[in-house]
Image (spheres, rainbow, N blue to C red):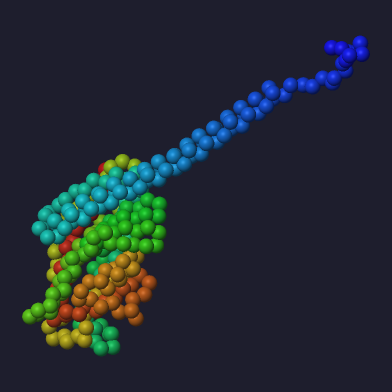
Amino acid sequence: MSDGRGGRSERPFRSDDRGVSDVVGYVLVFALVTATIASVFAVGITGLEERRDAERVENVERAFDVLDDNLRDVQRHGDPSRATELRLSGGELALSSTTNVTIEQVDASGTRVGNHTTRTVHAVTYTRGETTIGYDAGARFRTDGNTTLFRSTPRFVSLAGGTNRTVLPLVRTRPGDGPAAVDGDGTVQIATDAGEVKRFAFPEDAVAPHAIRLRIESPRADAWERYLAETDGFTVDPAETTGDVVVATIDRDEAVYLRVIVVDVSYRR
């Protein structure tokens, strides 16, 4: 090309970088799409796993609701045996957690007088991670971390009237002829067989106690304390209640009846 003076233009050569710009843009778009898909996938998988775990816990809770109903039939109607099926889903079903329930007569200083009775209950528990679902002495419960809540409560009854009386039905579950614990996966049958029924009445003849108290030693003492504090006819003693022990005075104590229903629990695959 002439510069008007008979010579050729000496304009420097400039490379075309449009191809490089297209590649960079493509790489950026691809990286953005990949990152977005990866993020959605990670969040989605986490959400699905959390939902799956929650569903497993809900299934176990429903199974324990059925177990609760079955044991109430044993308790109220004298059914000889019942069975409940539960899917383990990686958890452990055990009978290792114990609760001691004591009825005692005390004088004005809090010293025991006359006889007392103590019964040990082996709670039926299912544990997976930090969650435990179980049945303890007539109460269905759930523990998350360090907090336990009763899903159903014992049928303690305190009546006022011509005779101020209190009735304490206690379902005493204990190990049967199967293993004390099972874990892993698959379905397990919780077989419950009714055993002996024992009855105790307080105050005893020839004993005039100042008070009749209910003492419960349990890993779930906090839940028992709330239940007794909220139930008419019981007064929790804060001086005696500490750690895994809760003590409550039975307010209507002209006649106190303890009815213990023994139930043998066996785990069968």
Q: Nearer the viewer, residue 56 or 118?
A: 56
Can you give x and y, in whole percent of width and height, for residue 126 in the image? 32, 53
* Quadrant of the snapshot with the C terminus: top left
Residue 243's quadrant in the figure?
A: bottom left
Q: Nearer the viewer, residue 254 or 267?
A: 254
Residue 214 drawn above or below residue 36 = below
Give the left or right position of residue 15, taking residue 82 as reference.
right
* Quadrant of the snapshot with the N terminus: top right
Can you give x and y, in whole percent of width and height, for residue 19 in the image? 68, 22
Q: Which of 218 and 61 is in front in this view?
A: 61
Give the left or right position of residue 77, taking residue 2 as reference.
left
- How many labels, in total? 0
Residue at 36%, 75% in the rendered image: 242
Residue at 31%, 62% in the rendered image: 149
Residue sitting farthest toward the left = 162
Residue 113 drawn above or below residue 140 = below
